[in-house]
Amino acid sequence: MPTTFLTKEGYQKLADELEYLRTTKRLEVANRLHEAMEGGELIENAEYEAAKNEQAFVEGRIQELEMILASARVIDDKEKKEKGDLVQVGSTVTIKEEGNGSEKYSIVGAAEADPRAGKISNESPIGKAILNHHAGEEVTVEAPGGMFKVQIIKVE
């Protein structure tokens, strides 16, 4: 099973989601199923079908979260500080693409990536390109839309 990199916050968020799904959500879906089964003919019962689909989704997400958390490697702040200005999972990086303004991203594992919130995966084109490089370096990013260069301005 491949290692999943997570920040402390990301690990806690996924652990909280898992706990919610195991306790609250499972019970809600079980109650919906029970009510739908009491509603008569199961073959033509849309509510029963919807509840079964939701149950399958919840159970699938529980399994996914269990696997992620079992293979998780939580990024330690102390470990991050020892690396200085080296870009790694857990770093916050300011980059500048030629012709554009600077952008600030946190490098996180794929499980907690959220580009709209400024969290990009270490497996994304930009994340992969800047990983293990230092502030001041220029790196080439290989993206589906073509190659481009970014300058690493600052690593926190």
Image (tube, grey):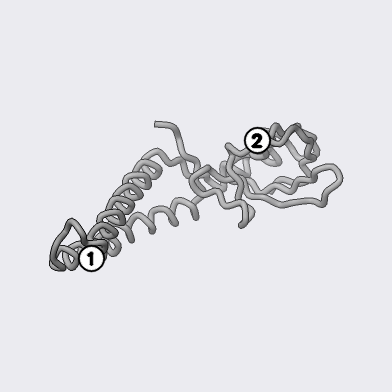
Residue shown at 66%/49% (left/top)?
92
Residue 130 placement (x, y as % from top left): 69, 36
| Circle nearer the viewer, 1 or 2 | 1
Q: Which numbered dot is residue 59?
A: none
- Determine which quarter of the picture holds residue 67: top left
Q: Residue at x 71, y 36 (%)?
A: 145
Which one is in front, 154 or 1? 1
Question: What amino acid type should be assigned to the residue bearing mark 1?
Answer: Arg
Q: Who is closer to the viewer here, 148 or 89?
A: 148
How many labels, in total? Answer: 2
* Circle 2 Cα neighbour tier, 10 Å, few/some/many (<14 / 14–19 / ≥20): some
- Residue 123 in the image: x percent, y percent? 58, 37
- Residue 68 or 84: which is nearer the viewer? 68
Q: Give the CA separation, mark 1 to mark 2.
A: 46 Å
Q: What element carries label 1?
A: helix
Q: Which of 146 and 148 is in front in this view?
A: 146
**Secondary element at image label 2:** loop
Q: Please, is residue 118 above or below residue 140 in the view?
A: below
Q: Identify the residue at horizontal 61%, vertical 57% (top origin).
A: 117
Q: Which residue lies furthest to the front in this view?
A: 44
Q: At which x and y percent is residue 127?
A: 64, 39
Residue ID for mark 2: 131
Q: In this view, does 102 lie above or below 83?
A: below
Question: x%, y% of residue 155?
Answer: 71, 45
- Is residue 97 rendered to the left or right of residue 20? right
Residue at left offset 18%, top offset 68%:
35
Q: Which of marks 1 and 2 is nearer the N terminus?
A: 1
Horizontal placement of 37 versus 135: left or right? left
Q: Dot 1, how many residues are within 10 Å of its Cα: few (below 14), some (14-19), or many (20+)?
A: some
Q: Which amino acid does label 2 sit on?
A: Leu
Pointer 1 residue: 32
Is 85 displayed left or right of 4 in the figure? right
